[in-house]
Image: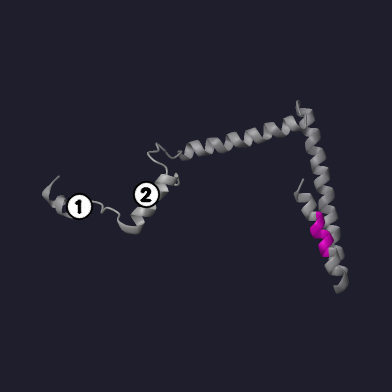
Amino acid sequence: MPEQYKNAWKPHQKTTGILALYYYWCYQLGIFPKGTDYKPTSPLMKEELRKLDEITAQVRYMSKHNISTLSDLQADREQNQSEMNKLIDYRQHLRNKVRRALPAEKETLRTEKQGRDGADNGT
């Protein structure tokens, strides 16, 4: 090492006291891993893994709903779209009712709307 860098470089100071005890017990209890060969995943690999997870979710959905052909997939899509349209219309109907209702009735309508939205999110 050149002389000019020897003076600038300071070695890492050894941890002592309470902090050293804390680190010691963390290693002993297995909180901190010993000698791992962890290598972070590259961004390209992460993107490919996201795509793979998406494809896996699609395949699981198709197997759960017994979809084997393109016509089955289109029929399922149309069914889901019609259910979603019904729910959107019902929610708009409730919004209009809340807008026109008296203040005493608004709370009951809002709780009904919240209950309906919570049931929709579960499916």
Q: Which residue is mark 2?
A: 24
Question: Is 115 in the magenta?
Answer: yes
Q: Is residue 16 left or right of residue 91?
A: left
Secondary structure found at label 2: helix
Q: How many marks?
A: 2
Percent across and percent down for residue 95 are 82, 62
Q: Is residue 10 left or right of residue 24?
A: left
Q: Quadrant of the N terminus?
A: top left
Q: Between residues 98 and 7, which one lies in front from this camera angle? A: 7
Magenta part of the chain: 110-116
**Mark 2 belongs to which amino acid?**
Tyr
Q: Is residue 55 left or right of residue 79?
A: left
Q: Residue furthest left?
A: 3
Circle 2 crowding by C-alpha within 10 Å: few under 14, some 14–19, many from 20: few
- Choose top left, top right, bottom left or bottom right for residue 72: top right
Q: Is residue 29 above or below residue 117?
A: above
Circle 1 crowding by C-alpha within 10 Å: few under 14, some 14–19, many from 20: few
Q: Residue at (88%, 69%) from the top-left corner?
A: 105
